Amino acid sequence: MTEQKQMNSIPAMSGEGLKRLVLIVEDEFVNRELLNAYLEQDYEILCAETGVEAMRLIYEKSETLSLVLLDLNLPGMNGLDILREIKKDIDLSRIPVIVLTSDAESEVESLSSGASDFIPKPYPRYEIIQARVRRSIELSENRDLIRWTERDHLTGLYNREYFYRYAEQYDVFHRDEATDALVVDVSHFRLINERFGKAYADEILKRIGSELLAIVKETGGIVCRREADTFQVYCPHMADYRSVAERVTDAACGDARGRVRIRIGVCSEVDKASDIERHFDHAKSAADTIRNSFTESVAIYNDELRDKEVYAERLLEDFRDALEQKQFLVYYQPKYHILSPQPRLCGAEALVRWKHPEFGLVSPGRFIPLFESNGLIRDLDNYVWRETAAQIRRWKDHPGRAVPVSVNVSRVDMLDPELTDTLRLIVEENGLDFGDLHLETTESAYTENFEQIIQTVARLRALGFKIEMDDFGSGYSSLNMITKLPFDVLKLDMEFIRTAFSENGNTGILKIMLDIADYLSVPMIAEGVETESQMLTLKELGCDIAQGYYFARPMPADAFGSLLAGSAD
Ligand code: C2E
Ligand code: MG
Ligand code: MG
């Protein structure tokens, strides 16, 4: 807030033809008039005869005052006290002060208390006074301008670019000190923005910024806003950052506790010989590992995470070749209708695996999020859809029977303007019906570009595709929003089954989800059904379809073909 005020005042201060405002604090009439006469041509002048009057004017004009000329010998108040008061106030400290005194001894003391210059009494030639006044104002305006460019305008903290420069300088002076790189993130900030509006969200960011600044003032170190809702701190090593996370959370929430979750990623005791930006990237990776955690607020970058990153980089490198060499295999996991007396095979989900020449069979949990983060998922999904469609065609020919197979459509695909055409062509080229290929999309896909995705889904449904809402209940949609999502099948997130059937769980929540499905007039699929008793309970509650290890794990196409052949009505 205070930084904001300072920065906003710069353009006005340096505006063309604008007379800067100078305050003369001097109790002796003759001296005051003399200074006035020297400066009134170029400056707008205010005068104060006492310390009290001076402070009142300084506070009143804090935003527009360009300079204070301060006599050290004032009745009732020492000029040095005024100087110190100005310099300790963050709002006033930007105002340069030139000290006026006949006591040569106080020069050093004035300068070390923050005076920008010194004019001895009796006064030197008027040109000297004018030159010193001009120079002090210029220097302070230049400093303000630098502040303007190196700062983030919302929070007043350094911006990222300058932060790295200052971090390097920091290292020069703290070469042997153990230092940590921190990334401080707000979990699901986008939702705060959406639900409470930009002004409120900005206020939260400012509060976080101020609190982080207060913390580094205590501990040492520097802080910046990295981007949007992410901050960086470079500070002396601390063993535990949970109390910091707590402090920042408290400050961010104000009186609305629970609305904001802060997470901190730490790259501890950085190696000062290596690239500074990398330390913060590591800290960011650590912070990302607890993005969805309700219990953890601090994550440390460690060897395990490092190995994971190396592994991820390797997968990225190998992706193109793997696609070309058909290393990606599509497995099929059956879905069963459970309301009939005997469970009846009624569909399948296509799930990709990577048969990596070195790592063996890699599960999609390892690479899908990775490919989603950089767009490669589009090529992979395209491949999976084509493989699946071709496979359904083969099953339709032999054993002459097929069930609808759902493919996963990631959030990135949903934003592809060609998506509808791509899928239509795949169906047509394989001579399938649109009902043969179901599309699974997750609730979280809708959180961004809501309208655009709704339209895409509407076009797909108009063609005849069935939309299955995957991992339902794991997103952050409000019930109100859910009723606006267009879909044909609700696929309950596996976590509900885990929770409902855990030791102290109860199945009440399943009943609620079934009521929602009922209200929306769509069937529900329960995923992750692992035991007979789970299946029977779901059946009793009225769940239509189940998928899970109890029936079968995802299997290669051949195996599923046999299952199909064997289950022919
Ligand atoms: P999903 O779409 O929710 O798929 C269900 C996941 O649950 C699959 O994991 C499946 O193997 C697993 N599963 C099924 N039954 C059980 C059970 O009884 N117990 C347990 N513990 N797990 C069960 P998988 O194959 O590892 O896939 C993980 C996720 O990767 C999928 O979650 C999906 O989001 C994504 N995925 C898989 N294939 C593709 C694909 O081709 N394209 C895209 N975009 N995503 C895919
Ligand atoms: Mg799925
Ligand atoms: Mg799922």
Image (spheres, grey):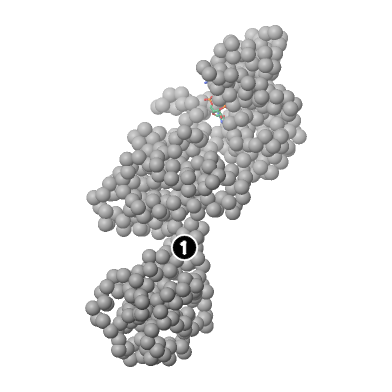
Q: SS at mark 1?
A: helix
Percent coordinates x, y for residue 83 in the rendering:
36, 72
Q: Is the residue marked 1 within 8 Å of ligand 1, measured from its CB? A: no
Quadrant for ligand 1 reads: top right
Residue 556 vs residue 134, the one in the foreground: 134
Name the side, left or right, on which 310 lies relative to 15.
left
Residue at the image point whose x is 29% and y is 49% from the top: 272
Name the side, left or right, on which 36 lies relative to 219.
right
Categorize mark 1 by other alpha carbons within 10 Å: few (<14), some (14-19), many (20+): some
**Residue 276 in view (yes/no):** no
Residue at the image point whose x is 36% and y is 58% from the top: 165
Type of the residue with mark 1:
Glu
Percent coordinates x, y for residue 432 in the rendering:
71, 26
Percent coordinates x, y for residue 239 in the rendering:
32, 40
Residue 162 vs residue 109, the one in the foreground: 109
Quadrant of the image occupied by residue 128: bottom left
Please say if 8 is above or below 280. Answer: below
Quadrant of the image occupied by residue 550: top right
Q: State the quadrant of the C terminus.
A: top right
Residue furthest front as drawn = 76
Percent coordinates x, y for residue 539 in the rendering:
66, 14
Please say if 486 is above or below 530. Answer: below
Residue 148 vs residue 53, the one in the foreground: 53
Numbered marks: total: 1
Give the residue pinned by disc 1: 3
Name the side, left or right, on which 395 lies relative to 463.
left
